[in-house]
Structures are given as C-alpha cells and as structure tokens.
Image (spheres, grey):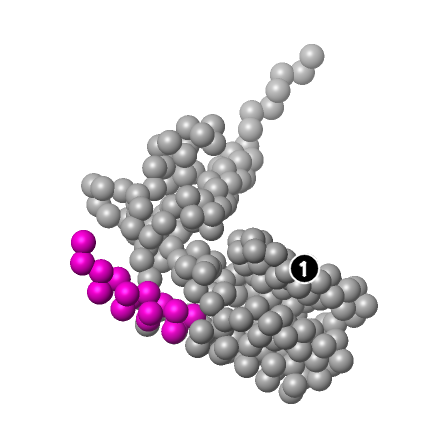
Amino acid sequence: MLPKKAASSADRQTGHNNLTREAYQDVRRMIFMDELRPGQKVDYRGMAERLGMSLTPVVQALKQMDLMELVQHVPNRGFFVKHVSPEEIDEAFRLRELLEVSLIPHIIAHLDGDGEQRIRTALDGYLKASQNNFLKLRLAKDMNFHMTLATISGQTISIWILRYLLDFLYLRFGQELIFSRPLETAAIGHQKISDYVIAREIQLASEAMGDHIRSIKNNAMEGLQSRLKESEQIDI
C-alpha cells in the first residue's frame, strides 16, 4: 500500500479558508436570528467548541466582520456586535440605491429565459413569505429577490458589494424596522421591478427600483428615529 501523500500547503490553506467561511456564516446566522444582539459579546471560544474547530478560523471570521463593521474588536475584552447609527443607515441605503439602479441595464442585457424564470421564482417566494407572520423568512426572501436580480447582471464586484450592503443593513439594522412599511407597498414594489425587468424596460425598471429602495429607507429611518426617541424617554 502506498503511503498517504502529505497535505500540500494549498490544501491546508483551502481547508482553513473553508473553516473560516463556516465560522463567518455561523456568526452571521446568530445575528440574523437575534441570538446575538447589538452590544452583545461574541463567545468565540464556545463557538469554536460547538463547531468543532480551533480558535483560529473563528477569530479570523470575526476579524473579517470587524473590517466590515458588523462586529467591533475591543482590545483585551473581545468581539462585540456593533450598534448602528442613523447616519450609517442613511449612507448604506443611498449606496444601495445607486448600486442596484446601476445594475438594471446589465441585468436586462444578460436576461434570458432562465433568468426570467429565476426572477419569477424569487418573486413568488417573497410574495408567499409575505402572507405569513414569519419576519425572518420574509427578510431572507427579500434578500434573495434582490440578490437574484444582481447575479443575473454578471457584475462580479457589484454583486459582492451588494451582498455586503444587505448584510450590513439586515444584520446590524433591526429587521422589524426594515419591514416597518406596509407589506402591500413592498409587494407592489417587487412586482413592478420584476415586470419592468422582464419587459426589458430599462427606464421604468430603474425608476421602480429607486422608488422601492427609497420607500424602504424612509420608513426604516422613521422607525429608527422613533425607537431612539423612545429609548431616550425611558428612565429606569
């Protein structure tokens, strides 16, 4: 029997990257599911033990999230889920609008029969999720709808940036504020975007996307301001 070949440095690096990615997704899931809330410390030692991996990939994942402003590293204390400010939310929504509207011509240019079906499937998933009270399911389907459109564009860097912006908004910003607008308004916005994209109407699709994102932003900012004002009035 031939002796086993020692793992190459490339193989070891790939394995390490996979573990870091797994740890990243686990922290992301915990924030998404409100298992980790703003200001809460991340128990990375317990996480490493639960995931069956060393501390190194978990810490690397948290360092990535620190760079993305999703968590904050406090020397000698550890990693904490970051709070968010209205100014950051305003900027993130403005960037998101610029990005998603700019992708519309590329989405339509790359659109084929398969792409049309992917859009319809993503829209149907969102509309079905909107019929129940599972907020996180609606949130996941909302993200999937916008990422489905983006991936059709073929614009690799823009897709990566949009994924980051959605993570920033939906992980750091309370989901209940994202969906403070009436469900009917959100559903109509998704429907219009889908219809105009599939009809290859660049101008109308761009306007629908811009209107949709501004609507989300305005309602969310109102909700955030109300929450901040309420917290200031509470005297415990």
Residue drawn where x is 65% and y is 68% of the image: 149
User: In the depicted view, which residue is nearer to us: 173 or 91?
Assistant: 173
Q: What quarter of the picture does the N terminus occupy?
A: top right
Which residue is the site of mark 1? 128
In the rendered image, is residue 67 in sight? no
Residue drawn where x is 72% and y is 77% of the image: 195
Q: Residue furthest top?
A: 1
| Depicted 42 relative to depicted 152: above or below | above
Q: Which residues are magenta?
A: 220-236
User: In the depicted view, which residue is nearer to us: 147 or 182?
Assistant: 182
Q: Residue furthest right?
A: 113
| Depicted 136 relative to depicted 49: above or below | below
In the image, residue 232 lies in the stretch drawn in magenta: yes
Q: Residue furthest bottom?
A: 203
In the image, residue 140 lies in the stretch drawn in magenta: no
Left or right side of 182 for 79? left
- On the image, the x and y values in percent for residue 80 come to 30, 48
- On the image, the x and y values in percent for residue 183 come to 57, 68
- On the image, the x and y values in percent for residue 171 come to 44, 56
User: In the depicted view, which residue is nearer to us: 77 or 122?
Assistant: 122
Q: Residue furthest left?
A: 235
Q: Amino acid at mark 1?
A: Lys
User: In the depicted view, which residue is nearer to us: 196 or 110?
Assistant: 196
Q: What quarter of the picture does the C terminus occupy?
A: bottom left
